[in-house]
């Protein structure tokens, strides 16, 4: 009886400790949401069991529809992992090989005879990214683009480099893989997602959308914060992001998807090992996320103002997914906080300090730089600083420390001096002086 009682007390204590972790994670996300830094949803899965699943903020702000654990969000480039899984399935079915060349399907694309399925999966083709490398397409992301139009656009690009010689991320590669899937199966990409992944992995809220966002069926819009309220972000046309980034899902489904992938429910172990092969930082739509000595496998995504990430740590069968639909804080910093709390590591909550408007006024004005051909105007509104570069939208600056402000979602830090500031981003620094 004493042994039984001891075991009961021990089990109860462990459960209590776990509950404390999840309560602190909830406190962090609630704190960020209440400070207008975050809207979205988080799921943590241990093996088959969901141990945390909660949403924060709105799915539709205009209609006051709050998000819940069933709310569905766009996942951006996490779509690529679904596309890669289906390509590996077709290879297992001997309809393709990693060495199959692109000219089998699209012989008019430059270097098609040299570009392999392997190159497409690993972004080693030299094909221009139709979203980030083509300003004309970037200006037309809100209108429909037919498959034929997209293929012609890709055909007209001049190669950036010889296939196989380097890695350069390009959404064009995964659009082409989606078209190839349709050609080989004679079914739409949406149908393939349902039969090849959704049914096999028992997903309930994952699909390729057929139209605009519909919040009446549990879908969510994305938002940006303008300093006083959340503003809805205009939707892209699904034909643009397509098999590179247009899918809809939930954090719970994304963690179930990753668990199914690593448990052999979607591809053979040999195919999974090939997907995990990292070359120049990128596998076959899998990347590694280090957290201490742990290495998570997964992918990130961004579309409109949705920001998504899913990671899976095979040794513990731990899946974590965060989807943000209100982007006003760095997604990576949120994930670091979640994992730090989960693993019982110290994590101080960020401090969002309001500064007196008179103090902020010292920083306002228009600044120029000899190192960058643009002007940045700093303004104050409702006790917050905003920055706006030439030809771009204004973005809020969050106080970090004395005279230091950040725009976390873009990795920007600005350190003010006397009529000057230093802009730091991606390891580079640029000096600006007030006009």
Image: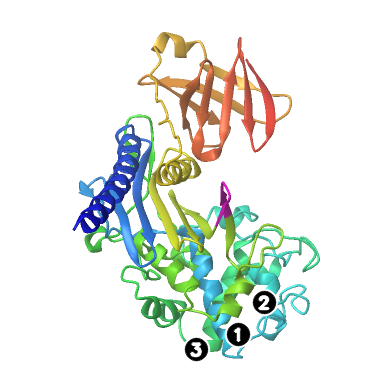
* Towards the viewer: 409 or 132: 409
Question: From mark 1 to mark 3, how far is it between C-alphas?
Answer: 16 Å
Q: Which residue is painted at 42% across and 56% down in the image?
A: 320
When asked about the image quadrant of residue 156, the answer is bottom right
Residue designated by label 2: 117
Question: From mark 2 to mark 3, how far is it between C-alphas?
Answer: 19 Å
Q: Which residue is painted at 33% across and 64% down in the image?
A: 49
Query: Where residue 91 is drawn, which disc sits there?
Result: 1
125 with respect to 47 (left or right): right
When asked about the image quadrant of residue 370, the answer is top right
Residue 138, can we see it? yes
> Residue 391 magenta-drawn?
no
Dominant secondary structure (helix, strand or loop) of the stretch shown in magenta:
strand
Q: Is residue 94 above or below residue 432?
A: below
Q: Which residues are magenta?
A: 289-295
Residue designated by label 3: 186
Q: Label 3, secondary structure: give it.
A: loop
Question: From mark 1 to mark 2, how far is it between C-alphas?
Answer: 10 Å
């Amino acid at each position: 009886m004493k042994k039984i009682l001891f075991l009961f007390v021990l089990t109860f204590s462990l459960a209590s400790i776990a509950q404390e972790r999840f309560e602190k994670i909830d406190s962090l996300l609630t704190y960020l949401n209440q400070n207008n830094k975050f809207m979205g949803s988080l799921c943590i899965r241990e093996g088959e069991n969901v141990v945390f699943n909660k949403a924060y903020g709105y799915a539709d702000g205009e209609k006051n529809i709050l998000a819940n654990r069933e709310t569905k969000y766009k996942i951006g480039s996490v779509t690529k992992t679904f596309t890669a899984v289906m390509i590996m399935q077709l290879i297992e079915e001997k309809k393709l090989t990693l060495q199959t060349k692109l000219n089998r399907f699209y012989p008019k694309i430059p270097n098609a005879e040299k570009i392999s399925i392997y190159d497409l999966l690993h972004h080693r083709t030299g094909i221009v990214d139709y979203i980030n490398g083509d300003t004309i397409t970037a200006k037309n992301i809100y209108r429909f683009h037919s498959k034929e139009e997209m293929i012609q656009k890709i055909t007209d690009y001049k190669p950036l480099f010889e296939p196989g010689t380097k890695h350069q991320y390009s959404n064009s590669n995964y659009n082409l893989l989606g078209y190839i899937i349709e050609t080989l199966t004679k079914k739409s990409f949406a149908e393939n997602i349902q039969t090849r992944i959704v049914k096999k992995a028992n997903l309930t809220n994952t699909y390729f959308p057929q139209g605009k966002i519909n919040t009446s069926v549990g879908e969510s819009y994305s938002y940006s914060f303008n300093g006083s309220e959340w503003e809805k972000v205009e939707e892209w046309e699904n034909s643009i992001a397509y098999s590179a980034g247009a899918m809809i899902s939930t954090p719970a489904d994304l963690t179930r998807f990753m668990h199914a992938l690593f448990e052999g429910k979607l591809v053979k172990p040999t195919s999974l090992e090939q997907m995990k092969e990292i070359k120049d930082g990128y596998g076959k739509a899998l990347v590694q996320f280090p957290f201490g000595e742990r290495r998570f496998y997964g992918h990130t995504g961004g579309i409109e103002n949705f920001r998504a990430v899913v990671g899976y740590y095979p040794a513990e069968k731990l899946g974590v997914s965060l989807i943000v639909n209100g982007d006003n804080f760095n997604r990576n910093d949120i994930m670091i906080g979640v994992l730090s709390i989960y693993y019982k590591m110290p994590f101080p909550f960020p401090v969002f300090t309001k500064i007196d408007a008179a103090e902020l006024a010292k920083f306002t004005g228009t600044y120029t730089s000899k190192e960058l051909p643009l002007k940045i105007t700093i303004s104050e509104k409702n006790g917050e600083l905003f920055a706006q570069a030439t030809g771009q939208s204004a973005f809020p600056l969050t106080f970090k420390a004395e005279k230091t402000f950040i725009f976390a979602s873009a990795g920007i830090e600005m350190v003010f001096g006397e009529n000057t500031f230093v802009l730091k981003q991606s390891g580079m620094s640029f000096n600006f002086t007030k006009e």
